[in-house]
Image (cartoon, grey):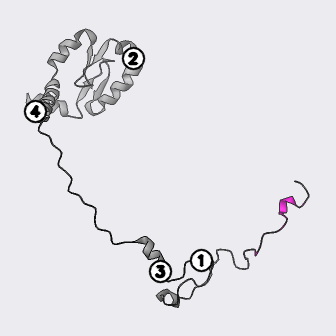
Amino acid sequence: MEETYIDSLDPEKLLQCPYDKNHQIRACRFPYHLIKCRKNHPDVANKLATCPFNARHQVPRAEISHHISSCEDKSCIEQDVVNQTRNFGQETLAESTWQCPPCDEDWDKDVWEDTSTPFVWGTANYCGNNSPASNIVTERKSNLASGMRVPKSLPYVLPWKKNGNA
């Protein structure tokens, strides 16, 4: 019995397709092949039924009740059901002992106590005088090529509207 169980778990074992007897498929690819072949052979698919315990078992509809009563995978499912019914009343959820950690932060208070000057975009010196960063020389960097500069203001007339076209 154990030897046949090990054989059924071998991913390289060749299995015969229930839809096309000429197809020999490796066990690891068998579920994917079943889906594909079921679509390609709808006439055969209508004559077969899927086992409720193992979707790899495709059985003729007339034999499905016999297969269900003798399916090897049925015992695994039944054992799970028995274990769940035994433990049904015994399971109790443990109460959580997690507590929120103490918080010493007060963000509103920190805003009012902050004496350094706020950051302002485009200003050269935004560090407070008592800050160690105030000793750093800040200079403006430009990504433009040398000899080019950013315009100081926008033109009053846009270039594409100079011709009077509106």
- State the image quarter where residue 2 is shown: top left
Measured Cα–Cα span from mark 3 to mark 4: 63 Å
Q: Nearer the viewer, mark 2 or mark 4?
A: 4
In terms of depth relative to the viewer, which is nearer, 29 or 35?
A: 35
Which residue is disc 1 drawn over?
Answer: 120
In terms of depth relative to the viewer, which is nearer, 46 or 95?
A: 95
**Magenta range:** 151-162
Binning the other alpha carbons within 10 Å of mark 3 as few (below 14), some (14 to 19) or many (20 upward) gives: few
In the image, is 2 to the left or to the right of 26? Answer: left
**Given the image, on which type of amino acid does mark 1 rest?**
Val
Q: Nearer the viewer, mark 2 or mark 1?
A: 1
Vertical position of residue 11 compared to residue 140: above or below? above
Vertical position of residue 2 compared to residue 20: above or below? below
Of the image marks 2 and 1, the number of the one nearer the N terminus? 2
Horizontal and vertical percent position of residue 151: 75, 74
Q: Considering the numbered disc 3 on the image, is that residue within a helix, a strand or a loop?
A: loop
Horizontal and vertical percent position of residue 144: 68, 74
Q: Is residue 99 magenta?
A: no
Which residue is disc 3 drawn over?
Answer: 114
**Given the image, on which type of amino acid does mark 4 rest?**
Arg
Of the image marks 3 and 2, the number of the one nearer the N terminus? 2
Which residue is disc 4 drawn over?
Answer: 86
In the image, is 149 to the left or to the right of 94? Answer: right
Measured Cα–Cα span from mark 1 to mark 4: 68 Å
Query: Could you tell me which residue is drawn at 45 percent across and 71 percent down?
Result: 108
